[in-house]
Image: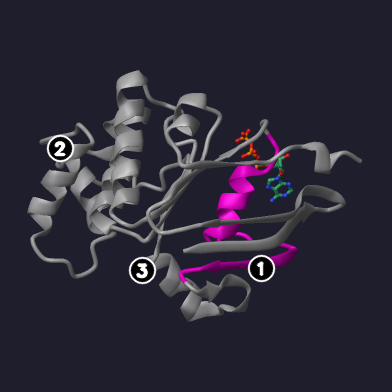
Amino acid sequence: MIVANGITKKFGSRVLWAGVSFSVDAGEMIAVTGPSGCGKSTLLSCLGLLDDVDSGTIAVAGRELGKLRGGDRRRLRRETLGYLFQNYALIDNANVNFNLDVSTGLKRNRRKMFEDALRRVGLEGRGEEMVYRLSGGEQQRVALARLIVKEPSVILADEPTGALDAENTDMVIDLLRGMANNGCAVVVATHSKHVESNCDSTLSLTTELAAP
Ligand SMILES: Nc1ncnc2c1ncn2[C@@H]1O[C@H](COP(=O)(O)OP(=O)(O)OP(=O)(O)O)[C@@H](O)[C@H]1O
């Protein structure tokens, strides 16, 4: 589902990572680890068409990202990619259900789908609440419910358990695992050994490459 071949990313003269190759199959969940600043979030952004690598290639669902232009990039983002990033990308000034609605397209039985997703993230019956009134951890779980509704083939999760307590951390791990078991390729950037131990494999980035 994801194949990265010899990818390198620099900011100015600073090399974040160089010659990195890995693949993530459908049904697989991998952890991306490494010290703060080593480029985990940047890697997820490159996989998710939010940034570009300097060299090497990335293919997602058989499409080479560097060759995609406007409409094709948008389509891949909309139809294939699911993001669970630190700002959650929620619409604060709207209720929870509205935020789930933006990812459903033309799917039927939306109301039932939303209720089911909210139940699975422990927010049963909270669909009418305004997002700005929710806690950080609750907002993170709304973002997760949005992924459950969207059913993407690829999930890019950046420190998805950062704002959560132990119980909710396990719920997030279980849900991501469940989506992987349903055929999704899941990439999780994390500092948590617990999250890492629940993944199938680990891609470890180091800062050694960044030394001047
Ligand atoms: N657009 C940019 N321009 C210049 N430098 C950038 C840019 N984006 C990120 N960086 C730098 O690249 C480095 C890697 O950032 P990134 O957020 O990918 O690290 P990370 O491994 O996810 O860190 P953390 O674990 O702290 O979240 C940082 O030093 C950051 O300041």
Q: Can you say whether 210 is above or below 81 in the image?
A: above
Ligand 1's image quarter is top right
In reply to whether residue 38 is colored magenta, the answer given is yes
**Callout 2: few (<14), some (14-19), or many (20+) C-alpha neighbours within 10 Å?**
some
- Judging by the rendered image, the residue that carries numbered circle 3 is 79
Q: Can you say whether 141 is above or below 42 in the image?
A: above
Disc 3 secondary structure class? helix
- Judging by the rendered image, the residue that carries numbered circle 1 is 57
Depth check, mark 2 against mark 1: the one in front is 1
Identify the mark nearer the N-term, 3 or 1.
1
Q: Can you say whether 61 is above or below 163 in the image?
A: below
Quadrant location of the C terminus in the rendered image:
top right
Disc 1 secondary structure class? strand
Residues 69 and 196: in front is: 196
- Judging by the rendered image, the residue that carries numbered circle 2 is 119
Q: Amino acid at mark 1?
A: Thr
State if disc 3 and disc 2 touch (CB < 8 Å).
no
